Image: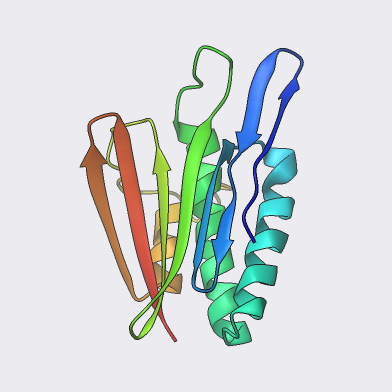
């Protein structure tokens, strides 16, 4: 199943270029808080289609959701006001990997938070959910890679 969806929102470009096949899902889109639930559903449905264990699905979907939330929260929008992210999910030997790329080259770092704080625990949560995590800087941004054993 391959396809292209594009459109506009009040003059801002919003677009996704989904590429879905057995073992690979690639999306590029404007991250918007109100659409994170749609991304979670798409990801969950694809992982179910691939036959991934429900526990692994939940861990990966939650980690990816947190990484996409960080794109929205911590990156500057482009000239159109968009927070563009690239998401690639892939079956790999021993599990499943996810890469979330954005246009901000700052490497995320956990920060100390008080026990009553409502935010600031995202990276700690991601690290607790996944088996491996790494960050790679690119010429125009960074990729955060996670792996969950399956």
Q: Percent position (x, y) of residue 141?
A: 31, 33
Q: Quadrant of residue 126?
A: bottom left
- Name the residue: 75% across, 40% down: 34
Q: Please name whichever residue, 36 or 27, is drawn nearer the observer in this view of the structure.
A: 27
Q: Nearer the viewer, residue 124 or 25?
A: 25
Q: Is residue 148 above or below residue 125?
A: below
- When the figure is inspected, residue 134 is found, relative to residue 91, above or below; the finding is above
User: 109 left or right of 60?
Assistant: left
150 and 69: which one is in front?
Answer: 150
For the point 26% across and 51% down, the residue is 135
Residue 140 in view of the camera: yes
Query: Whole-percent x and y of residue 21?
Result: 55, 67
Where residue 107 appears, as percent x and y from the top left, is 27, 41
The quarter of the picture where residue 1 lies is bottom right
Left/right of residue 132 with respect to residue 117 in the rendered view: left
Please say if 102 is above or below 131. Answer: above
Q: Is residue 43 left or right of residue 142?
A: right
Instruction: Residue 83 in the image: state x and y as whole percent.
Output: 53, 29
State which quarter of the image contains the C terminus.
Answer: bottom left
The colour mode here is rainbow
Residue 111, can we see it?
no
């Amino acid at each position: 199943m391959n396809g292209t969806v594009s459109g506009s929102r009040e003059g801002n470009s919003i677009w996704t270029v989904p590429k879905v096949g057995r073992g690979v899902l690639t999306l590029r889109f404007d991250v918007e808080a109100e659409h994170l639930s749609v991304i979670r559903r798409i990801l969950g449905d694809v992982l179910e289609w691939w036959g991934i264990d429900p526990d692994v699905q939940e861990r990966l979907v939650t980690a990816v959701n947190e990484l996409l939330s960080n794109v929205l929260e911590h990156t500057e929008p482009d000239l159109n006001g968009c927070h563009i992210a690239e998401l690639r999910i892939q079956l790999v030997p021993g599990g499943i990997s996810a890469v979330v790329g954005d246009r901000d080259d700052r490497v995320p770092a956990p920060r100390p938070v008080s026990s009553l704080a409502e935010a600031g625990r995202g990276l700690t949560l991601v690290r607790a959910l996944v088996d491996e995590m790494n960050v790679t800087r690119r010429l125009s941004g960074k990729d955060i890679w996670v792996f969950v054993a399956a």
